Amino acid sequence: MTPIRPFVVGGVTIAPFGLSIVPFVFGFGLTVLWGLVEWERRRLSRGEAVLFRPKLFTNRVYVTGLSIYAIYSIVTTGFGFVLPTFLAMAVGFDPLTIGIAFLPFAVAAILVSLGSGTVEKYLSPKRMIQVSVVLFVVGLLLLGTVLSPTVSVVSMVAPLAVFGAGAGLMRAPVSNVSLSAAGNEKGGEASGILETGKEFGRGFGNAVVGSIFLASLYGGIVDQVLNSTGIKVSQTERSRLIVSLEDAAQNFNSPGNSAAAGGLPKAVQGLLNRIVETAAVDAVQIALVLVVGFVLLQLILSGFLPNTRRSEEDEE
């Protein structure tokens, strides 16, 4: 895995064995995590205080809820990065307009979240999560049909409201079913791990979904420019062009002001706005498909949850 962009610290390039540092960082993180679990086990065996009991991760319902909660953060955070970036780059919305466009999402999420307690009397957390998945998918599919360089705030109201309803409906049942499975004795540590899972999901959503969106965007721009000029390059040269574009591009909505456009033929410069818009639409569609994939993973995981309503648990 050759690094596309070298990792440099203090003028020193870090590329172990000539490879990207990313897999080594992941490996180090997993090693630290394993060390933490082992350390907690030893403290527990000596009767000392621990941050969490590793046995908690043998609870299938809790681990399933934790996984769904982390993916929930991946979905909402990744979506919250990709759509505003697209609206700014391809459509030309300013921050205020983007904020107004997201109001249906926020309002729907708040209203549905407030009413989720009532819904729990009639539906089990498992069914609520599955309904949320349906709302997520419907909202994303509706959004995918309207996104274009000429999309309006009004045309996004229904898709964002449906997506927001899914977000508002899912959070409470996932948290409740996870903490109920952990029990009162382990409630504190179970809640802390849930929050850690949420933060992991946020970071992962921004890093993975955002990176795929930007890579698709920059790659699409480079490919379309090369096709317009008839220039053939190797895969290595293409990667270098993408990195150069990432470094040079400052404002895609005004390519004439970007250093990235300066060396292009005038005929291509005239097409650059259209090229960027087309690449942005393709990139956001790819990112939305990825988000749908994460949502469907939640649906699969929900099958491992018990189908018990809160009222039935109270009776027991």
Image (tube, rainbow, N blue to C red):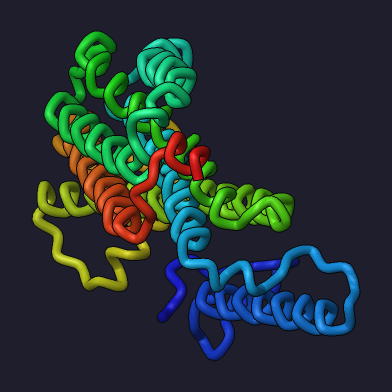
- Quarter of the view holding residue 51: bottom right
In the picture, the quarter occupied by the N terminus is bottom left
Looking at this view, name the residue that lies furthest to the bottom.
17
Question: Relative to 271, does residue 156 appear above or below in the rendering?
Answer: above
Residue located at (38% from left, 20% from top)? 105
Count of numbered marks: 0
Question: Relative to 258, does residue 32 appear above or below in the rendering?
Answer: below
Left or right: residue 208 versus residue 50 is: left
Question: Relative to 173, does residue 189 appear above or below in the rendering?
Answer: below
Q: Measured from the top left, where is residue 225 in percent x and y?
A: 19, 47
Residue located at (19% from left, 33% from top)? 138
Looking at this view, name the residue that lies furthest to the front.
315
Tell me if I can see residue 144 in this picture. yes
Q: Measured from the top left, where is residue 265 in percent x and y?
A: 20, 42
Left or right: residue 254 versus residue 70 is: left
- Quarter of the view holding residue 112: top left
| 247 or 150, nearer to the observer | 150
- Quarter of the view holding residue 164: top left
Tell me if I can see residue 221 in this picture. no
Q: Measured from the top left, where is residue 121 in percent x and y?
A: 40, 28
Residue located at (26% from left, 51% from top)? 296
Q: Measured from the top left, where is residue 39 in percent x and y?
A: 78, 80
| 186 or 102, nearer to the observer | 186
Left or right: residue 259 versus residue 39 is: left
